[in-house]
Structures are given as C-alpha cells and as structure tokens.
Amino acid sequence: MTTKKKLELLKNGLSTLAFANYCDVPESTMRGYLKGTIRNPQLNILQKIGSACNVPWSWLASDTQPPMPDEWKMASISHENLKTLLELDTEVIDIETSDEGTPFPVVKAYDDEDIHLVFYCIHCGTWHSHGRGGKMAQFEMGRKGAGGHRIAHCTVKNSPYKPSGVILDVVGKFKDLNNKRREQKTLFCPKCSNYYSAAFNACECGFVNKKRKSAHPELEKFYHEMLNPLTWAILPTKKGQKSSLPQQQNKSVTAKNGSIAVGNSIAGNVTQGDQQFRNPDVLTLARLLDEFESPAAIKVMIKKYEKLREEMDF
Ligand SMILES: [Zn+2]
Ligand SMILES: [Zn+2]
C-alpha cells in the first residue's frame, strides 16, 4: 500500500483542508501527498500525521505492509482476540475458559456410531473426525461418552481451533443430520504457500481471496479488519473489543487561522504558503486577482472558486 493510499484511509471522508488542519500540516502539502504530486514526503510531516492519527510514522513512510503483530497471529494470538474470533463462529456453541484465561471452543459433534465423532470445521471446510472409543461404545449425548477436549486436526495455518484445541459436545447422530455439509477443497495461499481459512477467506500473510465469498461474513469482516495495519495501530489488544476503524466523528476538527473563511484561506495560501507546495488552483486564482479588471477573468475566477469550494467542502 502506498503512502498516498494510507493517507486516504486515514482521511476517512474528511475534506483535505479539515484533514490537513487536524494533522497540523499545510493544506497544500497534504493535497500534494494525496494527489501524489509530492513523491517524497518529508519525515517531519509524516511524524505529524502519524502522531495526529495515532499510527506509526514508519508505517506511513513505507510502501510495504509491516508484518502482522504477534497478538494477531494464530500461533501466538492473545486470549482476547481468540475469544472474539470464537464468539463470531456459528459452529461454536459455548466457550470455556481455563484459570489462565485461555478460551476453549465447544463445538457441535455428531456420532457416526461406528468409529468416529465428527465435527464440521468451517476453517478447513472439512469434517474432522476423532475416535469415539470403539464400535461397542454406547451413544452418549454431550461430553459423557467420548466427547470432551481434543487437539484440533486443522490443516489451515490460521485456524482459531489450533491454539487450544476443541471441546467436542455430541449434539446428535451423524445419520440423523439433515443437509450434511459437503467437504470443500482446502484453500492454498499463492503468496506464502500455506493453507488458509475458508471462513476468513484470507491468509495470515495478508492475502485476501477476492474471487470467493465466505459463508461466514461476520468472521470474514472481522478477520479482514485484523489484517489491516490501521487496526493494529489503533486497537492492538483491547479486551472484548469489536474492532472498528477510526470514525470521522472521533476526530476533533478545528479550523485554524480562520481558514474556514474562503478569502482568508486563499489569501493565506498565496501570501504565506510554501512556494514549493502551492496548490496550482490557488496560484491561478492569485494571478486572476491581479487581473481583476477583466470581466472574463472574473468569470473564470468564479468558476475556479466554485470548483475549489466544492473540493474543500466549504
Ligand atoms: Zn480445521
Ligand atoms: Zn499466505
């Protein structure tokens, strides 16, 4: 993701002027960054934007995605984040928590009355099977029989069943289950060569499969937010969080130096602005103001003014 794209994300619907004021950088500079006309953003400006928007400036400066923080990676995920993923999982009927706070998902299991207890893994897209204690074992609901805690058989790298396993809770006989789910092909990541979750429809490396849709949109949405570096910067490990990107209304936008008044803003930019970063529209307006006598010039000026006004959301 380029610096330009990241700034657009942070701008989040604000006008360029309001965003520039929010970050306390010149409006013309911000416009240059957003339009991509200023190719090498200055470090001190990026630091200002970073501190105003609560993101690391080093992230803004690079064109590449930084690596995902450990608390979001499945192998070392925080208890809070794991719990949120399990709460959004429709196959999980309960969550048990150990004394140390580790969450364990309780999943719907079915007895084949032969060899296995099976449960459908929405991440691998397959039925995982676990021994039921032999053919002679009696059918038992819940965890009285062969149910209970098992190590997950998941093959996908970012399966949330991997960190603590699953607790099988027998809810019925497999033969009585209507509309048995079909197994699907395990999804392989072209970017990092690992298998990734069908429910998340995305890989831990940041790869998102845009060609298919997940059957679990809430999980998919949450996981995609997890992959977004803005989420890491803003909400790393908050308890019981429902992640969301910064909202426009959270930003306290204050107009500085009277720049909300059009006349002041334009005059301010022309007389005080840094020559190098001047908005071409502002320069044209200044030139037209010099030629104020000409009615044609005034017409052009009004047009330019209206366009600028629209762009700046006055
Ligand atoms: Zn699995
Ligand atoms: Zn990958």
Image (cartoon, rainbow, N blue to C red):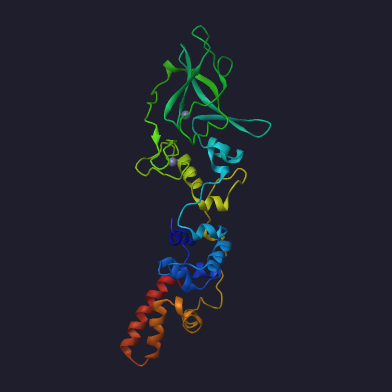
Identity of the residue drawn at 41% across and 81% down: 283
Return the x and y of residue 154 as percentages of the image width and height. 48, 29
In the image as oriented, which residue stretches furthest toward the top?
Answer: 136
Ligand 2 image-quadrant field: top left
On the image, the x and y values in percent for residue 158 come to 49, 36
* In the depicted structure, whether residue 310 falls above or below residue 87: below
Residue in view at x 57 percent, y 41 percent: 81
Could you say which is closer to the camera, residue 17 or residue 61?
A: 61
Q: Nearer the viewer, residue 121 or 32?
A: 32
Res 251 visible: no
Q: Residue at x 49, y 46 (%)?
A: 227
Residue 266's place in the image compared with 235, above or below, is: below
Q: Is residue 295 above or below residue 83?
A: below
Judged from this view, the residue extending furthest toward the right is: 99
Q: Quadrant of residue 281?
A: bottom left
In the rendered view of the protein, which quadrant contains the N terminus?
A: bottom left
Depth order, front residue of 261/84: 84
The x and y percentages for residue 287 are 39, 86
Left or right: residue 208 versus residue 43 is left
The answer to whether residue 32 of the structure is visible from this angle is: yes
Residue that sits furthest to the bottom in the current view: 293
